[in-house]
Image (cartoon, rainbow, N blue to C red):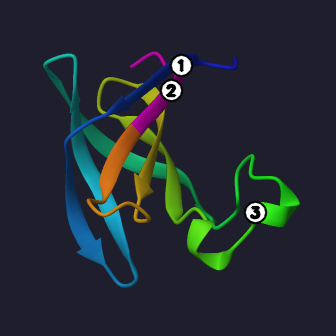
Amino acid sequence: MDGRFIGKVVPVEVSQEIGFKRPVSFTWDSQVYRVTEILLKWEDYGFGQSPPKNRHWWLRRHRTYYHVLTDSGRIFELYYDRASKKPSWVLVKEIASREM
């Protein structure tokens, strides 16, 4: 399943781990989703769609992506964007739903 695109900035409760922020819960459409497991985590320091001549170090992305399993059995992709002046969490998509 490719998932359902969401693409919204959402509030996320985190716990500070060594070297990264671990999502504990997030709110989307007035519903709180508790994260029960981080299934996957990776860093993105790429340039996105920037043409090669415009690839300066200050234009790099600084994102940490997560695939998370929630207490409702749904799997979501989130990322923490550290590159902006005000760091934010973005709920990218719902990947799947597991039967609970």
Distance from disc 2 to disc 3, alpha carbons, whole Å, reads 29 Å
Q: Earlier in the sequence, mark 2 or mark 3?
A: 3
- Magenta span covers which residues? 91-100
Three-letter residue code for mark 2 = Lys
**Residue 37 image offset from top left, x and y in percent:** 41, 49
Residue 20 lies left or right of residue 60; in this view the side is left
The reply, left or right, for residue 53 in relation to residue 89 is right
The C terminus - image quarter: top left
Residue to which mark 2 is pinned: 93
Q: Position of residue 87 (x, y in %)?
A: 30, 59
Mark 3 surroundings: few (<14), some (14-19) or many (≥20) residues within 10 A: few
Residue at 31% of width from left, 23% of height from top? Answer: 72
What residue lies at 70% left-to-right and 62% top-to-bottom? 46
Q: Position of residue 3 (x, y in %)?
A: 60, 18
Give yes or no for contact between labels 1 and 2 (Cβ–Cβ under 8 Å). Answer: yes
Residue with the mark numbered 1: 5
Residue for badge 3: 54
For label 2, the crowd category at 10 Å Cα-Cα, with few meaning under 14, some 14 to 19 and many 20 or more, is some
